[in-house]
Each structure stands twice: as C-alpha cells, then as structure tokens.
Image (tube, helix red, strand yellow):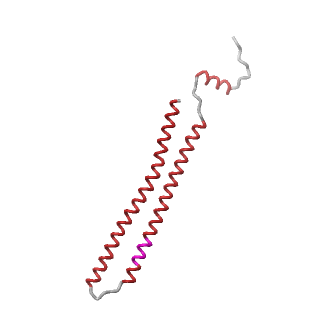
C-alpha cells in the first residue's frame, strides 16, 4: 500500500476529496458577471424613472405657468359689464375653459407617468428574462 506524503495540507485534501466526488466547480466570475448585470439594469431603470420624473415636473411647471398666464390675461381684460348676464356668460366661459384645460393636463400627466413607469419596469423585465436564460444555460453545462 502506497503511503500518502505527510505534506498534504487540509486544502489539498479537501480539493482531492472534491475531485474524487466530482463536485462541480463554481464559476465565480460568471456569478459576479450575473450580479453586475443585475445592478446595471437596476441603475438603468432608476435613471429612466428619474428622467421620467424630471420631464413630468418640467411639464407640470409649464402647465402651471400657462394657467397663471391665462388667469392674468383674463384679469387684465376683465371689465365689469353693466349687464349681469354678460358677467355670468364670461364667468361660465372661463370656468369651461379651465375645466377643459384641467382635463387635458390631467390626461397628459397621466400619460407621462404611465410611460415613465412602463419604461422602468420594461428594463427590469428584460433583465429578468436574461437572468433566467443565464441560469438555464448554467444548468445545461
């Protein structure tokens, strides 16, 4: 019976034990690459969300400026007519325009929020698909 050399370290014995059992090796670089891609997708999603929020706030500021300009124009052009019916007609027209503008603006804001959210989620959804494919290919090896 051949005698093993006494210089085997614990690590050498453990490595030999793993080879003898045919334990699969772990590809640390593949694991790091997988997580790096996950973090990149999260960062890209966060940037898309931030860009969406920035464009939303910018558009809301424009809407507010437009509304204030319209109110200021109406106030400057307002002359109290002697006729109460004319006054009521002007007030009703202003209320109608304000309501229509508010509806239009609400729809536009809603669309901006939807697009921003969809873009962020789509980035993450695509990364999940890629990650699942990576995991499947890892099992096939």
Residue drawn at 44 percent across, 54 percent down? 117
Horizontally, is 58 left or right of 81 in the view? right
Residue drawn at 37 percent across, 80 percent down? 74
Residue 66 covered by magenta stretch: yes
Horizontally, is 16 left or right of 37 in the view? right
| Count of marks, rendered view | 0
* Residue 23 % position (x, y): 58, 26
Task: Name which quarter of the figure residue 34 lies in.
Answer: top right
For the record, the magenta segment spans: 64-71
Task: Name which quarter of the figure residue 90 lies in.
Answer: bottom left
Q: Is residue 26 above or below residue 99?
A: above
Horizontally, is 26 left or right of 93 in the view? right
Residue drawn at 58 percent across, 22 percent down? 21
The dominant secondary structure in magenta is helix
Instruction: State the residue lying farthest toward the left.
Output: 85
* Residue 127 % position (x, y): 49, 44
* Residue 87 % position (x, y): 29, 83
Instruction: State the residue lying farthest toward the bottom.
Output: 82
Q: Is residue 28 above or below residue 121?
A: above
Residue drawn at 28 percent across, 80 percent down? 88
Quadrant for the N terminus in the image: top right
* Residue 60 % position (x, y): 44, 66
Residue 109 covered by magenta stretch: no
Q: Is residue 128 above or below residue 137?
A: below
């Amino acid at each position: 019976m051949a005698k093993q050399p006494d210089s085997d370290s614990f690590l050498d014995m453990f490595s030999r034990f793993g080879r003898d059992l045919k334990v699969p090796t772990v590809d640390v670089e593949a694991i790091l690459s997988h997580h790096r891609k996950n973090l990149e997708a999260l960062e890209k999603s966060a940037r898309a969300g931030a860009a969406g929020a920035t464009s939303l706030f910018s558009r809301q500021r424009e809407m507010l400026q437009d509304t204030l300009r319209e109110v200021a124009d109406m106030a400057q052009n307002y002359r109290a007519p002697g006729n109460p019916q004319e006054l009521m007609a002007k007030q009703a027209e202003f209320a109608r325009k304000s309501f229509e503008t508010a509806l239009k603006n609400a729809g536009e804001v809603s669309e901006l929020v939807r697009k921003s959210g969809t873009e962020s989620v789509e980035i993450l959804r695509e990364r999940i698909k890629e990650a699942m494919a990576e995991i499947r290919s890892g099992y096939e090896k």
